[in-house]
Amino acid sequence: MWSGIEDGLLADLIDQRELRDLSAWQLDGGYAERSAPLSPLDVLASSGGYYEIHSGIVPTCPAGNDRPPPELASLRVISLTAPRDAVSACSEWWSVTLFLGGARIRGVALRLGAP
């Protein structure tokens, strides 16, 4: 499973045996003025289940990056984002993008807004 930031700024491959280990999902690098570790699962958990679902990649706030990681570019994409009514500044915006191959998730990309 590919897990990374945006289109591959930072990325790891998670072995099938490690998918249930929450620490395997942590990315060790700073991004969008936040420090490591970063995890797409932590971002989703902190939403309390309150998010919007979009088809495709939602551009990162404010930069507008909507490119997929090259190795996942041919897959179907769904993005879970912070709801519009919960975001008053780019620093509050987030997205967890799922890359789907058939009925399986093949990759997860974290996107965070920056001030």
Image (spheres, rainbow, N blue to C red):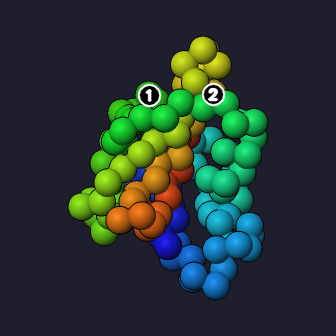
Residue drawn at point x = 57 percent, y = 82 percent: 15
Residue 92, disc = 2
Q: Quadrant of the C terminus?
A: top right
- Choose top left, top right, bottom left or bottom right for residue 101: bottom left
Task: Pinpoint residue 4: horizontal percent, then vertical percent.
Answer: 50, 61
Element on which disc 2 rests: helix
The amino acid beneath tag 1 is Pro
Mark 1 or mark 2, whichever is nearer to me: 2
Element on which disc 1 rests: loop
Label 1 vs 2, first from the N-terminus: 1
Residue drawn at point x = 30 percent, y = 60 percent: 75
Residue 27 visible in the snapshot: yes
Task: Pinpoint residue 91: horizontal percent, then vertical percent.
Answer: 61, 28
- Choose top left, top right, bottom left or bottom right for residue 71: bottom left
Task: Pinpoint residue 26: horizontal percent, then vertical percent.
Answer: 67, 64
Is 17 located above or below residue 31 in the figure? below
Residue drawn at point x = 34 percent, y = 60 percent: 69
The amino acid beneath tag 2 is Glu
Q: How many badges with numbers are in the image?
A: 2
> Residue 14 vs residue 105: left or right?
right
Q: Which residue is mark 1?
A: 62
**CA–CA distance in space, label 1 to label 2:** 11 Å
| Residue count near mark 2 (Cα–Cα under 10 Å), binned few <14, some 14–19, many ≥20 | some
- Choose top left, top right, bottom left or bottom right for residue 90: top right
Residue drawn at point x = 50 percent, y = 58 percent: 108
